[in-house]
Amino acid sequence: MTKVTELFVNGRRVAVDADSETSLLTVPRDQLDLTGSKYGCGEGQCGACTVLIDGLPRRSCITKAGVAATKQITTIEGLAKDGRLHPLQQAFLEVGAMQCGYCTSGMIVTASALLKSNPDPTPQEIARFMEGNICRCGTYQRIVAAIQEAARAMREARS
Amino acid sequence: MSRGPIAQAPLEPERYELESPPRYHFEVDRREFFRIFGCGIVVACFVERVVEAQESGGGRRGFRERFPQEIAARLHIGEDGTATVYTGKVEVGQNARTALTQAVAEELRVSPGAIRMVMGDTALTPFDMGTFGSRTTPTMNPQLRKVASAARDLLIDLAAQSWGVDRAGLGVENGEVRDPATGRRIAFGALAKGQKLAKAIPAADPLSPAAEWTVMGKSLPKIDGSDFVTGKHRYALDVKLPGMLYGKMVRPSSFGATLVTADVGQAESMSGVTVVRDGDFVGVAAPSEPVAARALAAIRAEWKSVPNPSGQELFEFLKKNADPASAGERGRSHSTGSIEAGLAAADERLQATYTVAYIAHAPLEPRAAVAEWRDGKLTVWTGTQRPFGVRGELAETFRIPEEQVRVQVPDTGAAYGGKHTGEAAVEAARLARAAGRPVKVVWTREEEFTWAYFRPAGVIEVASGVRRDGTITAWEFHNYNSGAAGIGTPYDIANQRIEFHGAKSPLRQGSYRALAATANHFARESHMDELAHAVHRDPLEFRLKNLRDPRLRAVLEAAARKFGWGRTERRPGHGFGLAGGVEKGGYVATCAEVFVDRSDGQPAPAGPPEVPTGTRRSVGQVRVLRVVTAFECGAVVNPDQLRNQIEGANVMGIGGALFEAIEFENGRILNNRFSRYRVPRFSDAPAIEVVLLDRKDLPSAGAGETPIVGLAPAVGNAIFDATGVRLRSLPLAPDGMKS
């Protein structure tokens, strides 16, 4: 079995030790102490494990470490820049778009990809894009509002 | 309003998963206080603890036991001015941490940011029976306010002594005692310096009324929220200790199966792997999660299975296996007047049977625990609603005194009543003891769907009589298996017979958000609708005609008004329904609008559906478009968090109402993963509006559970309104909508 000895995570090259067939989720969690990405189902159905791979949202629980070996991986820990929260993180706080918070990392990472490709999404577009992320506490309405709020803030910052 | 013994039963009989009563108190004497918590001032609130013995298959030793006075909550003011609160309650997403912080901030007159809250640590926090039953707001909140208020008085006394003035002229603001007459001020920390002052207060001191609140009653954002949006917060399954191993369990092939053989040789030979075989307990601990998975796969276990009831015959099984003795038990039945007379006086008589399926809590964080042994003492981090209960479980399992066990509960990734038991804690501790190193056990989603416990399934039979003028004359209501919570009726009915019948359950069952109130409200509020239609009356008007309770009337009217009940034009395929109820001191009314898509080509079934069997009928795609919930629970502690809970409860309720159901056969769960067990997603979420009735003149009640009970019947009634088809089984439309 081939080994993965190095990954690019949140802009840094880091040494790891994982079989290429291992699920990517365990590597940041268990080897890099980046526990923000969560285990929720192990079958890519809940989105709690979502990371960005070359900017695209991927369910790391069903992604093999070997596949991510040469790509840029971004976890929730990599979204804040220079101690400043990403607009999505800020918006989730302002709207109160969480209860237990367990889905929150996956929601924010997934939404960050949405806003890169669609800076002004409608609620329907948001719901469609986010459909793969489960919030069992049921805060969907607030998450949609937070994503819209972040989108607005990001458009304003650009103008 | 009829509020008989059933409605007042303090702990519901259907908390089946709690098998033994809570056992002990954690008492720390005065010297210990300051050795552990540092110099300063400690105020503790004493209560007379009323402990209800759990009924679990037959009551024992009396319904209540009185313990001597016991500490309920503790507050420590340190030399640096920090106020540290110790409470045995835990945070599971219901935002207890925030609301309790507000309670202390209100009475102590400090900013919420100056308060540190230690929750759910059996070594540090006073004993607590568990965070369930919507009890935190009505009990812990006032207890914390009392200790904070007493601490405030103590600080004023200290300042008065120090300044040689009468305490009457002094005030407290923003963490300081101030003398308006001289402008002098002294910070709490300075007053606490060098002190080893401990005071115990009875739980009877007066508190500031809700109308004067400045911190409570406000929508304080979730404490530590930034830790959650940055991924910094560590849930139990994120805890990491040096040298920690990863544990996995071999599970039985089916429920009730016993271990015949287990070939563990190959696993044992793997480097760094510890295997434990202890009776039917077979588990592995390994240096990494992938190695643990390989070790687990290398074990060949043979199980002897036992016959298990079929999921296809669930409701017949429940009725056939009802326990005849349970109907007479206290808290399980209630009668007034004469059913026979009531039926005789009726112009219309109805009978209907309703069923609810088993459903799973499916908290997004599965059960997980990290266990470490050190010098014979055990420490476990786990997400549970009952840290002291789990501590007792561990002490009993390992035959060590409870004082040698410490359970700590990190703010947890949800529970909904499903994390009262400590399975993962026991497993991690057993593996850790064998391995001589800390062990983390994280249940897989499949394990979480299979080896925890479910919300009980149930059969509810209702017989009723109503006069043409809309007066309900008779109400007979039997619940089989699912429970007695919410089994009473809030409507004014002279002749009632209400009974709960315990039954043998094919699946392990236990507490789930609102307990049986969901099932009982579904049956009752659907049946109320059926009665209303039988006498050609509007469902809202019919309810109000039979209802004097002003608080329930108020939420029904508020929800209807906001929804536009009776004023909204009906479009083809759309239907409107409403439901109301009272549970645990909270009053709820929910209106729902559904859209039923008939474009699948299936004609509407004619006539009323038969008594439900194992098969389900489909009425085409069902979508819940809009929900309005009015809610009243006394004085509101945190309006936005309360709205959040109500919105979330409605979304969760849609799952149980429309499509969630555990499917089982031959002692196996057939749909034990999210790809097969559908939970509400973004596309299922309706537009939800919440109307809060803030009764500052009434004590605050909890709200974690009650908001869910109005959803299912409102949706069922709306489906009837849209289609003329009356559905009496939850889930109502499991094959509706895209999956």
Image (cartoon, coloured by chain):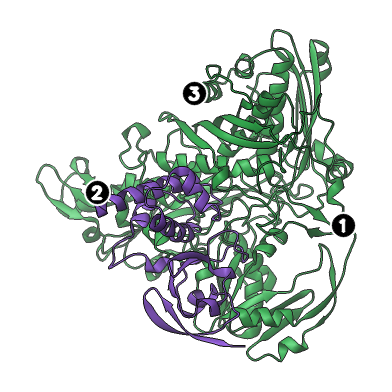
For disc 1, the marked residue is B308
Chain identifier, colour purple: A
Q: How far apart are marks 3 and 1 (CA)?
A: 48 Å
CB contact under 8 Å: marks 3 and 1: no
Residue receiving disc 2: B156
Q: Do the residues labelled 1 and 2 touch (CB within 8 Å)?
A: no
Q: In which quarter of the image is the N terminus of chain B?
A: top right
Mark 2 or mark 3: name the one nearer the start of the chain: 2
Q: Name the residue under label 3.
A: B558
Task: Identify the subunit bearing mark 3.
Answer: B
Say which amino acid is labelled 1. Asn
Within the image, what quadrant is residue B547 found in?
top right
Q: In the image, A107: left or right of B255?
A: left
Q: Which chain carries label 2?
A: B
Q: Callout 3: few (<14), some (14-19), or many (20+) C-alpha neighbours within 10 Å?
A: many
- Figure colour of chain B: green
* Residue appearing at x 39%, y 73% in the figure: A10
For residue B612, above or below residue A36: above
